[in-house]
């Protein structure tokens, strides 16, 4: 069980060598975050971007020996070059720096130099919530806008692979909806039933899946008892699957801004995990996201 992000960092110390390719690396907080991770584990970095600006940020004498710079002043070109380093095996993790998200994702999906695998690209968020006993994971509040049944299955598969890499051997997964009753007029409930049926057929190994299930029931054994719902995962869910990007995004921001949760996130479904940090993310959030991506990369 991962109680918090400190547990993630501790696991990172023992995974061996990792190289991060930072696209458009003239970003002081991203460099600071990678330097922090490198101080804790065997991590190297390739900083792809405007070399003059990168050196000005770091100082020529303060750049660690295990960091190198590739000069590529154009941000879109830097993103493509960084992606190609991961594609060829010169780096293990791709990270977004000071580049527009659409340009970054265009590089990720480039058929010749990017990281396309034919799998759905999805987002996995991790939250350390005050008062909770372990990290909780959400998907997908960041990439897949309106997932149908097959997209939800792919989102679960991506997340499940990563949770196994993180050492969560048999995750409890809640397929969220407004309530627990299957209603043909509410696609989230019918999708949830289909996903649970697929799990029962063995489509998703080494996990427990329940749904449709409302958030209050998934989060609280007391709420489940009050509603007369029998469940083996309530109050102990590892992964929450949201019915839409809006619901996942809103829930995550509520946790961060009102519950004062710490959050980290990674992109899954590409050849290797990707750190796509928001411009509003601080260096600590980026450290935790890098750590997640490093651990998830071990099976990729």
Image (spheres, rainbow, N blue to C red):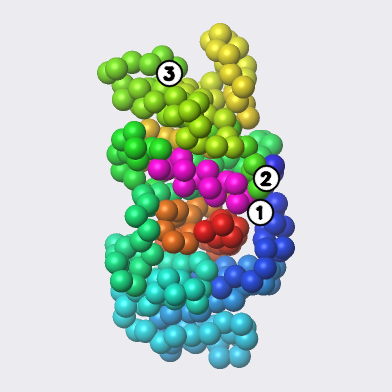
Res. 130 in view: no
Q: Is residue 279 magenta?
A: no
Q: How would you classify the magenta stretch by its main secondary structure?
A: helix
Residue that label 3 marks: 179
Q: Pointers 2 and 1 in contact (CB under 8 A)?
A: yes
In the rendered image, the vertical position of residue 282 relative to residue 44, given as above or below = above
How far from the left and from the top, in percent, is residue 85? 44, 76
Q: What's the residue at 34%, 84% (across, down)?
A: 73
Mark 3 element type = loop
Q: Is residue 74 left or right of residue 202?
A: left
Q: Is residue 264 left or right of residue 190?
A: right
Mark 1 element type = helix
Disc 3 to disc 2, C-alpha distance: 28 Å
Q: What's the residue at 55%, 76% (across, down)?
A: 45
Residue that label 2 marks: 2
How far from the left and from the top, in percent, is residue 145? 31, 43
Residue farthest to the left?
Answer: 185
Q: Which residues are magenta?
A: 154-166
């Amino acid at each position: 069980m991962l109680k918090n992000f400190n547990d993630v960092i501790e696991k990172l110390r023992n995974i061996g060598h990792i190289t991060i390719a930072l696209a458009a690396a003239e970003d002081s907080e991203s460099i600071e975050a990678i330097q922090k991770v490198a101080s804790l584990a065997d991590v190297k970095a390739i900083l792809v971007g405007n070399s003059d600006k990168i050196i000005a940020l770091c100082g020529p004498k303060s750049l660690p020996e295990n960091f190198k710079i590739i000069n590529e002043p154009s941000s879109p070109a830097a993103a493509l070059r960084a992606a190609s380093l991961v594609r060829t095996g010169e780096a293990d993790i791709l990270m977004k720096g000071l580049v527009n998200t659409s340009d970054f994702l265009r590089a990720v999906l480039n058929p010749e130099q990017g990281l396309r695998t034919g799998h759905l690209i999805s987002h996995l968020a991790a939250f350390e919530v005050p008062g909770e006993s372990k990290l909780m994971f959400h998907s997908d509040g960041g990439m897949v806008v309106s997932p149908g049944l097959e997209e939800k299955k792919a989102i679960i598969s991506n997340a499940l692979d990563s949770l196994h890499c993180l050492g969560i051997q048999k995750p409890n997964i809640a397929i969220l909806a407004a309530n627990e009753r299957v209603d043909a007029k509410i696609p989230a409930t019918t999708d949830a039933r289909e996903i649970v049926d697929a799990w029962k057929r063995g489509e998703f190994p080494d996990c427990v899946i329940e749904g449709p299930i409302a958030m209050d029931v998934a989060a609280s054994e007391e709420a489940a008892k009050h509603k007369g719902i029998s469940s083996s995962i309530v109050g102990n869910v590892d992964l929450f699957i949201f019915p839409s990007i809006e619901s996942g995004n809103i829930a995550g921001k509520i946790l961060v801004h009102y519950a004062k949760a710490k959050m980290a996130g990674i992109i899954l479904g590409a050849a290797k995990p990707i750190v796509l940090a928001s411009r509003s993310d601080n260096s600590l959030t980026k450290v935790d996201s890098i750590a997640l991506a490093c651990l998830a990369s071990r099976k990729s």
